[in-house]
Image (cartoon, rainbow, N blue to C red):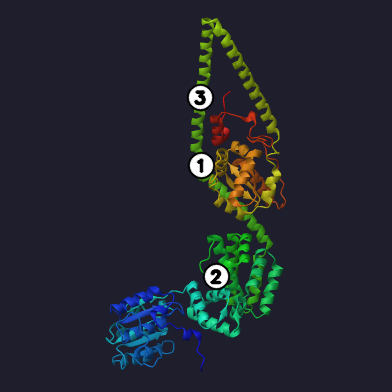
Amino acid sequence: MSYKALYRIYRPASFDEVSGQKHITQTLRNALKNNRVAHAYLFSGPRGTGKTSIAKILAKAINCVEAPTDNPCNKCENCIGITNNTISDVIEIDAASNNGVDEIRELRDKVKYLPGYVKYKVYIIDEVHMLSTGAFNALLKTLEEPPQHVIFILCTTEPQKIPATIHSRCQRFDFKAISNADIIDKIFEIAEKENIGISEEAVKQIANYSEGGLRDAISLLDQVHAYNPQTIGLDDVNEICGTVSFNTLINLVESLVERKPANAIDLLNNLISEGKESKKIALDLIDFFKNLLMYKSLKAFNDVTVFEDSEEFKAITNKVNNKRLFNILKILNDALNDINWSGDPKTYLELAFLKITDKEKALDEKIDEHIQDLEERINYLESNQNTFDNKNKEDKNILEKVNEVEAVKTEKLNTEKTDFEEEIIESKEDINTKETKETKENENVKEIVSTNSEKSQIEAEICDDISNTYNISFVEEVLNNGDRNDKLYLLDEWQGFERGITNKDEKYLASLLETGKVVASKKNKIIIAFSSATICNKLMVPDNKKIIQRILYDKFQRDIDYMALPVEVFEDITKEFMELYNKGETDIKLTKIYCDGLKDVSKVKKDDKRNEESKVVTDAKNIFGDLVKVKK
């Protein structure tokens, strides 16, 4: 037969040509260079990773005319003879078919004879784990103390089946599965040499299906090229492997994620009618959801895959959360186990699809999400209890300092008044000057009293109705259409708002924003909880709100409206929402937000003089909230 398979043509002939096993080739090359070759080696690892190939390269290197050398020349008679299997001193034995005691005894008897053509006899025993217990015992003594002209190389895919007595007499090398990147490089190299047209997606899929075995990958390339001698595409590889095409797989996954059982079952029936196996469909789905979970958790893949360049794949990540992905993977894995032992595998796959798309389960998952949110908030409050206690102590200290400052101001005012009376007696001229000053001071006092009185009246009016600022319909819309994944994303990125801001006022607002926590999100609308109602009022002032919205846009590259609420107010709202939700209500309506330090600031402007306060009082309120009370 004239045709030679690609994996035989491109079998490595030297250590330089071996892919993905540098830790082994480097060790062997150093041993050869320093003439420290052991009498027995054990090569273990997955299929198609180069165990037998490296064994033959080692046999050539120790028998090369140029020995000692760290690499065979592949030009001398010895190297060429070993490559062509014409030198009888390098013996390959298949232990699967020669696993009895008699065969090993025969081998043991022939070991004592000197090699006829080269310096060393090399016995390469493949699949050595297949030897019987008696055969291992027969080999044991020879393996421990072989003649100086003999080297044993044992190869296996299941090292755990080899007795410990054999292990202890060999130098063991563990071959690792070859990475997809190395396989892809090798496939492209072979395709270029053989003039095979192939797409990048097809090469990635070949690497994925080979599961770390380079020989399997080259064999699959050979097979697919025979199927399509023109240009090999992704669908050609899937067709040869009996797997689901990429587009069909995307459609099937979307039907499952979006809970459309009819679509999913129809697609399954079509695949079965095309000759696809239920087990292979289940494995493809498990691989897809595994990669989906990997990408959502790490924002990257653990190896090169066809999914990394797919926008459809990345779009699905926004439609499902990690908890549901774990649940889907468990359902599919259970179905796969049932399929392996069933005479009707399609039924188990259909049941798995129905279970994944069950809408009652969706309701349970949503309840679990709300419960998880509540648990997160409780944990947050409990973990920050010490901080709150320390803050209360600091609040008291600040209040004492504020009162001390007010007392000093009052004492100073009284001292100035006494000095003023004394000066009246001393000079008549001064009396006129002082009377003018006193008149102005009295006018200022009246104005302050009037302003404070007017401010109190305004606050009383504002407290009656705060719905213009804190409209409950905003909260209802966010909670009824909440997006937990977006909330978690915002929480992860909720820092660094001050970066790049130079304006002092805007930087101050950004620092206040960072003290809050996103507790609910609907993409374009969010609710932020703060420890103080005073901070909420400040951030809800229309002029301030415009600045905050611009800061949010710069950070997240989308328009976001928000409502700032105190933590305790939002907890009361959530409690009411969950009670109605558990009763089966869907479009939930909540009671109005009651005044608890909150004010209607919808008409307050940045330069409104009625709201002007001294800097120390303003800063104290912003930091410590409603605990600050200013003595009149």
| Gap between marks 3 and 1 measured at Cα | 30 Å
Taking 246 as reference, is 388 above or below it? Answer: above
Would you identify the image quadrant in which residue 507 lies? top right
According to the image, label 3 marks what residue? 405
Q: Which residue is mark 1?
A: 385
Is 266 in front, or is 584?
Answer: 266
Q: Position of residue 260 (x, y in %)?
A: 70, 66
How many other residues sit within 10 Å of disc 3, few (<14), some (14-19) or many (≥20)? few
Can residue 519 be seen at all in this image of the molecule? no
Amino acid type shown at disc 3: Val
Whether residue 505 is visible, yes or no, is yes
Q: Answer above or below: position of 418 versus 362.
A: above
Task: Give the x, y percent position of residue 58.
Answer: 36, 82
Q: Secondary structure at mark 1?
A: helix
In the rendered structure, the answer to whether residue 381 lies left or right of residue 360 reads left
Tell me the element at label 2. Answer: loop
Label 1 to label 2: alpha-carbon separation: 47 Å
Q: Earlier in the sequence, mark 2 or mark 3?
A: 2
Dot 2 corresponds to which residue? 305
Tell me if 29 is positioned left or right of 157 in this view. left
Secondary structure under tag 3 reads: helix
Q: Residue at (30%, 92%) from the top-left corner?
A: 115
